[in-house]
């Protein structure tokens, strides 16, 4: 692994930490030399006064403690003085074991279902999505990205046969739709909500308008004249009858339109309900509706219409994707922004989305955690341990050097106590 492999560990304060580590190492070495020098001086002055024995004992034990802790700290990372002493350079010698144990530890304690789910539940994924979509620039960028993908997606749909499959599935579903109950139910709701009254008024108005047209009057007049005896034709009975028919029809239509309770309205309702009942119960009517549906779906014009719609849609998308038109991008961006606003305002929807994301991620992590631990172990095994040890020592080496200070102090105190006990035993 190259020297740049651990660049991610480097920080802006590394130079200061390295200088501080050097100072602490020098200070720890000076403490060790000072302890040794005090020990030599105290042993030389021991004949002068017995008190120097206590000083010598403290300094001797402090020197030994400092040396022992220096050895322990160095042996953790490398071989002391480069000598091939067993059980030294512990981290380097156990790189593979450390890698495997680190992977197992992360899998067991970090990727276990309970802590993973607890951590995932702390994250409000839906609010993040809502805020992200609420930014118009981001939504516009997303719209442009989606538009760039759509032409390729449509081409892939055609070449992969997905388009044919979808068309067949749609046609199969349409063939399976039972139109009779659907039409009957819609008609019942139409009648129940009294929306058919407007239909009746419209029909009456259309019929009345057609009857009063000069062309219609002329046709009726000709038909009546053809049926009348010759004698009545001489007295122009046809004109009289046409006038009476139009006048009667006009009066009838006006009465029905003005009177909500007119008997004809009841007859019209009964007629519609009768048609609805036939749709629901008469096999012949149901079969005719099914036949009409089959004939309609089998018409080649319907396939041509679908192909034309597909071609027009594809052309429209390609024009927008190429930048020739920005209509679709603008509307897509608006859709994304509105979706973000709607999601931000709908707490229940956000809760459901977060729950769904937690379930998906929890399952995914549970399935992949063994692979993650194996990947971590492989990466650690591939590290250049000398460089990694340099990084570790740079970050925690200062604290490790204080072990040497503590070793000298604790060792010196222990030596002083033992020497004191020895002196007391000699006095007794």
Image (cartoon, helix red, strand yellow):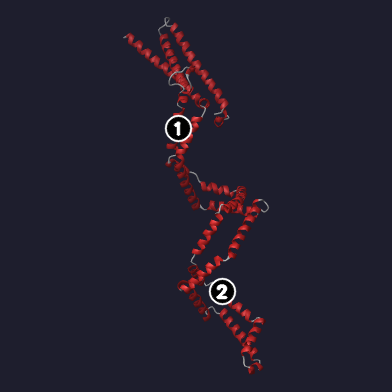
| Residue drawn where x is 49% and y is 13% of the image | 33
Instruction: Tell me the quarter of the image containing the C terminus.
Output: top left
Q: Residue furthest bottom?
A: 231
Out of 220 and 299, give the one closest to the viewer. 299
Residue 138 versus residue 101 in the image, above or below: below
- The residue where tag 1 is placed is 102
How many other residues sit within 10 Å of disc 1, few (<14), some (14-19) or many (≥20)?
Answer: some
Task: Give the residue at mark 2.
Answer: 199
Task: Find residue 136 and name its label.
Answer: none
- 423 lies left or right of 281: left
For label 2, count other residues whose C-alpha is less than 10 Å away and answer few (under 14), some (14-19) or many (20+). few
- Asked which secondary structure carries label 2, the reply is helix
Q: Position of residue 306 (x, y in %)?
A: 59, 61
Work out which residue is located at the far top of the displayed protein and give it. 47
Q: Nearer the viewer, mark 2 or mark 1?
A: 1
- Whole-percent x, y for residue 256 in the image: 56, 80
């Amino acid at each position: 692994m190259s020297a740049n492999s651990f660049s991610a560990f480097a920080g802006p304060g590394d130079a200061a930490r390295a200088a501080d580590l050097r100072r602490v190492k020098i200070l720890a070495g000076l403490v060790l030399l000072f302890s040794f020098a005090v020990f030599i001086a105290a042993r030389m002055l021991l004949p002068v006064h017995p008190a120097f024995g206590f000083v010598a004992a403290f300094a001797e034990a402090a020197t030994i403690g400092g040396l022992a802790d220096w050895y322990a700290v160095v042996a953790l990372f490398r071989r002391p003085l480069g000598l091939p002493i067993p059980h030294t350079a512990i981290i380097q010698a156990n790189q593979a074991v450390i890698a495997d144990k680190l992977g197992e530890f992360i899998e067991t304690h970090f990727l276990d279902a309970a802590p993973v789910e607890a951590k995932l539940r702390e994250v409000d994924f839906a609010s993040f999505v809502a805020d992200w979509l609420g930014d118009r620039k981001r939504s516009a960028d997303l719209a442009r990205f989606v538009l760039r993908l759509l032409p390729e997606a449509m081409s892939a749909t055609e070449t992969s046969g997905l388009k044919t499959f979808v068309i067949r599935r749609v046609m199969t579903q349409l063939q399976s739709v039972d139109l009779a109950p659907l039409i009957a139910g819609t008609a019942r709701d139409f009648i129940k909500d009294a929306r058919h009254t407007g239909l009746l008024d419209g029909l009456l108005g259309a019929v009345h308008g057609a009857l009063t047209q000069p062309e219609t009057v002329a046709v009726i007049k000709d038909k009546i004249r053809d049926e009348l005896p010759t004698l009545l034709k001489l007295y122009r009975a046809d004109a009289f009858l046409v006038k009476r028919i139009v006048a009667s029809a006009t009066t009838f239509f006006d009465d029905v339109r003005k009177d909500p309770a007119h008997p004809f309205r009841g007859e019209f309702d009964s007629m519609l309900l009768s048609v609805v009942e036939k749709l629901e119960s008469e096999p012949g009517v149901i079969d005719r509706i099914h036949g009409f549906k089959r004939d309609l779906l089998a018409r080649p014009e319907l396939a041509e219409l679908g192909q034309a719609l597909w071609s027009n849609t594809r052309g429209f998308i390609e024009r927008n994707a190429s930048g020739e038109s920005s209509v679709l991008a603008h509307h897509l961006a608006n859709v994304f922004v509105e979706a973000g606003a709607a999601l931000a305002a709908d707490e229940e929807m956000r809760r459901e989305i977060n729950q769904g994301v937690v379930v998906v991620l929890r399952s995914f992590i549970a399935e992949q955690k063994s692979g993650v631990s194996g990947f971590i172990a492989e990466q650690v095994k591939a590290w250049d341990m000398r460089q990694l040890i340099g990084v570790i020592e740079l970050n925690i080496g200062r604290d490790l050097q204080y072990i040497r200070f503590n070793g000298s102090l604790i060792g010196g105190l222990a030596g002083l106590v033992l020497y004191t006990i020895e002196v007391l035993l000699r006095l007794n």
